Image (spheres, rainbow, N blue to C red):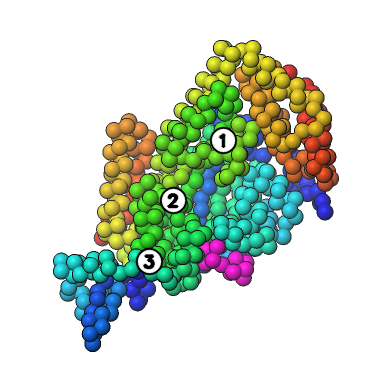
Amino acid sequence: MLCECGREATIHETVIINGKAIEKHLCEECAGKSGLGAQVHAPLHELVSSFVKAISPAEPAQLSCSVCGLTYAKFKQTGLLGCAHCYAAFEEKLGPLIERAHEGATHHVGKIPRRALERSRQGGPGRLESLLGSAEERRVRLEALQRQLHEAVQAEHYEQAASLRDEIRKLDELNGGET
Amino acid sequence: MFGSVSNSGGLGPDYTTPTEWLRGQGRCSDVVMSSRVRLARNLAAHRFVPQADRTQRAQVLSLCRRAVERVGPLRWVDVHTAQEFERRLLVERQLMSRQHARGKLAGGIGGPDEPRGLAVSLPDERLSIMVNEEDHLRIQVMRSGLGLADALAAADAADDMLEEELEYAFSPRFGYLTACPTNVGTGARFSVMMHLPGLKLLGDIDKVRRAAEDMSLAVRGFFGEGSEAVGDLFQISNQTTLGKTEQVLLHEMEAEIIPRVIDYERHARRMLVEKRRMTTLDRVYRALGTLRHARLISTDEAMELLSLVRLGVLTQLIPAADIKPINALLLFVQQAHLQQIVGRELTQQERRSERARILRERLADVG
């Protein structure tokens, strides 16, 4: 689900206006601007939004990508996505699908486009975030790598452990470079 | 219409010589024919191939072609305008997929005229880059024998050079974004093509299948997805691409699964030579006999028999100085290469007889 500004919506709100229930899907920033920000982390809000999600129809028929126009129905038919934005547009549905296809993996670890990374390091934290993700995503990734490292050591796969340690060091460095 | 693809000398391709996966060099080349690394990449601001119209595909093609030129002196083929015959040669040499030759994607999207290209490094044919296959870019590096690490290093370097020119589609969560979500993350597919006649003769191929599936690796045939394992040639490749680094994926294949399969196969061959010597001797010599005397032979039968002869030579049941001419025949019995060698278009019946003739000639000194 996307916010009006095109970013991933993380705040889902149902407002009653003139006796009509209207659903709003906003990213944190837009929610803050529209005055919803204060309630963002209230447990009650969580309850309401998850309730709204639970009662909303499971499969909106016309779910589609706003950039390339691919419908989710068409994707289900071909198994192929239409553009990079499709991943954001269908993230809610794709997430679990991808997780199943990749043995429970949820986050990328490994190569990051080299030139893009170099440019981002010179261009400030915002750009780096577009490659490395939010603080939360980085934490998830580091944890996954540390888990893999632990398993590799347990299994005495030392070469693999060494390459994982390098990867963790690289990510640590990148994180440090930003702060 | 048949146009024999000429061997223009110098930088031109020579389709009458074997290619990288048949060189019979590298580690464990008694069992491992070749190792391949393939990276899937897409451009950020462009529609993926399945959702792009012809104009958009042509635009991506020209952008990628320019970037490909930076990688080195590669031979470029406009696949959509290439002759059907040359497309077939390129598929047989494993430089591009059958899907790329046809131009058709899953769900029947596309067709033979859709703008798409292929770049190949010459003369070694170790690097090839498909443009507008299922993804904008598929970088493929091949190595004879077991050499995934070397292939990954080369693919990685080519990838960096392409990225100098191109903006890749990438997300922090899903990594390199691909048309099919089963390829996201590293976008890296490692495949090892193995010749497993020993396990096949002992009826133990399912053991390999099970072991591979336990590690969520896929076992496929000669030409990849959906193809039969003709000639006892099996491709083992990773299925998951997300959540593990390239190095870990590589390690799981090259240090864990593949050595185990190599051991199984070598053990099977020893069993066949030591415990079932006469039966095996009979099998490999009957195969050689048929190949040296048949007057009509199909591709599949030729592949099956060549597999047994290869087993015979590698186990020294059949004396032969060199395995390479036999490897080469695995390619030359294929439809397009056969016609390339003969130098003209052949009907199916003619192919069967010409194939038999070439096998007779080239195996005259073996055994």
Instruction: Say which mark, if any, is on residue B186.
Output: 2
- As measured in the structure, the alpha-carbon distance from the residue carrying label 3 to the one carrying label 1 is 41 Å
Q: Nearer the viewer, mark 2 or mark 1?
A: 1
Q: Which quadrant of the rendered structure holds the N terminus of chain B? A: bottom right
Q: Nearer the viewer, mark 3 or mark 2?
A: 3
Helix, strand, or loop for circle 3? loop
**In the rendered structure, are the residues bearing label 2 and label 1 in contact, judged by CB atoms less than 8 Å apart?**
no
Across and down, in percent, residue A117 comes to: 40, 59
Label 3 CA crowd tier, 10 Å (few <14, some 14–19, many 20+) = few
Helix, strand, or loop for circle 2? loop
Image position of B331 (left or right of B140): right
**Mark sitting earlier along the chain (2/1):** 2
- As measured in the structure, the alpha-carbon distance from the residue carrying label 2 to the one carrying label 1 is 24 Å
Residue B23, located in which quarter of the rendered image?
top right
* Residue A80 shows in the view: no
Identify the amino acid type marked 1: Phe
Residue at x 56%, y 67% (from the top left corner): B52
Image position of B360 (left or right of B136): right
- What secondary structure is the magenta-colored segment mainly? helix
Identify the amino acid type marked 2: Thr
- As measured in the structure, the alpha-carbon distance from the residue carrying label 3 to the one carrying label 2 is 30 Å
Image position of B256 (left or right of B72): left
Read off the residue under disc 1.
B234
Helix, strand, or loop for circle 1? strand
Instruction: Say which mark, if any, is on residue A59.
Output: 3
